[in-house]
Image (cartoon, coloured by chain):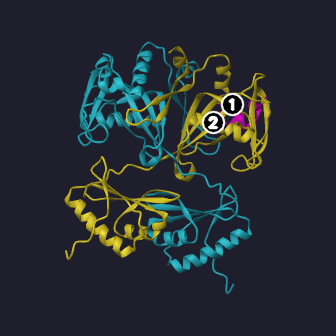
Chain colours: A yellow, B cyan
Amino acid sequence: MFGAAKLLSYVEDDYGGVKVEMKEAMDSATFVSMLRASISHWREQGKKGVWIKLPIELVNLVEPAVVEGFWYHHAEPKYIMLVYWIPQSAHTIPANASHRVSVGVVVMNEKDELLVVQEKTGTFGGTGVWKFPTGVVDEGEDICAAAVREVKEETGIDAEFMEVLAFRQSHRMFFQKSGLFFVCLAQPLSFDIRKQDSEIEAAQWMPFQEYAKQPYCQKTEVVQYVIEICSAKKNGKYSGFAPVPTTSSFSDQKSYLYLDSHFRRRQ
Amino acid sequence: MFGAAKLLSYVEDDYGGVKVEMKEAMDSATFVSMLRASISHWREQGKKGVWIKLPIELVNLVEPAVVEGFWYHHAEPKYIMLVYWIPQSAHTIPANASHRVSVGVVVMNEKDELLVVQEKTGTFGGTGVWKFPTGVVDEGEDICAAAVREVKEETGIDAEFMEVLAFRQSHRMFFQKSGLFFVCLAQPLSFDIRKQDSEIEAAQWMPFQEYAKQPYCQKTEVVQYVIEICSAKKNGKYSGFAPVPTTSSFSDQKSYLYLDSHFRRRQ
């Protein structure tokens, strides 16, 4: 090799691989020459996986990396993560995030009325179906916080999170990703509805029996289960999962553990 | 406009947007001219979000699309999804899949022994900590199936899934994504351990009390909860969530709903 090319800056990961986070603008010829020199250096060192994170400003380097044998691992609005496997063996690169998480929230008042909405768009837009508030859990958001936020956003009602009543895992939903839908129970703290205009057609407190009688509810197996669960819950015959804050041994971060609410109460 | 450029093929989505799935190779100049003509057509029609799916073979079109104002939505090994928002208003493009899902599996035999492993790599590699089998749920895989698969892969033990004992949601884990970790209970159907060589250092049946006495278990809050849950479970004082197969009203696909196992048994 004539005058060895400079290597890309990298750090080692815990799995025998290396991670490169590109930050400075670079033309593609320089990038390719540094990338080739780096890969042969890492190969000599017995490294396995190579991760390259490219901010969207460096989009000019995506094609050259793919031409060198990299493939896409995942992308977010502001970056793409590319990956390469040096050994001859089959790669053990972990998969990308695979699940979208959403919540549906059962909010019942003292008169046995359920907080329900009609949506303007999406699957239920224009169908006239009354359903409980639902929504996607934001990145980094706790399920219990998302439930309270969605109720507030869609109906203006303040609510206190009680427990997860059940959850459903579905496949090949949004962009072929899987989904985890958590059915939550929350207790209303206010009663005057102020519905959101952009997504919600109407919102009201509806007698539980009237909700359950809708043809949509009658023919949807999961909704039937939720109706039975709500009835059992009212009679104290059902135990969902309640959140307890825990700390990790690896970081100071708080994570909620959700466990049998009857057990939790006995502790 | 001189001789209107051809439009890209597209379909409409349920939210007032359009989706383009590029399949044929194209040079970037042609692509840019078709893209500009298409966007002005969609703007006249009042369309909002524009999705473009580019297979990795068409990586040459990523940079031109970004130059035209698209940004990354998500990527998988074989494609990248780009997105653009036509109106002046703030976009309402839904977020990408946000959670990785993993399982840890409690497998206990009749002698009150727990199935435990020592890992070769990762956080626990070389620490000597005995832990229950854990692993990532594959894309499209059911949580209950993943639990049985991980136990089989790591230890050779056949097991039957019983229930989800608890779950924990953590943030900023793998690549800043969130994680959902499901603690599962499974019943062993075989007893002779044949450990996996690539990832597992050792595997054994260990008396439950001995497992619980490890310093790692003593100082890890979540493990303490799991130990208490297991004790309560042995005494019939704990109810996890058991899976029931359900069908959706929108597709023939089977999805598992996980709900209070005591309630499930009474049904």
- Chain letter for the residue marked with disc 2 in the picture: A
Q: Which residues are magenta?
A: A210-224
Q: Name which residue lies at 39% across and 21% down.
A: B227
Counting from the top left corner in percent of width and height, residue A128 is at 78, 43
The quadrant holding residue A214 is top right
- Residue A142 to residue B43: above or below: above
Q: Which structural element holds mark 2?
A: helix
Q: Name which residue lies at 23% across and 40% down.
A: B197
Counting from the top left corner in percent of width and height, residue A25 is at 42, 69
Kindly identify which numbered label has been placed on residue A159: 1
Mark 1 residue type: Ala
Q: Name which residue lies at 60% across and 52% down.
A: B94
In the image: residue A60, left or right of residue A134: left
The quadrant holding residue A73 is bottom left
Q: Main secondary structure of the magenta part?
A: helix
Q: Read off the residue under disc 2.
A: A147
Counting from the top left corner in percent of width and height, residue A151 is at 69, 37
Mark 1 touches mark 2? (CB < 8 Å): yes
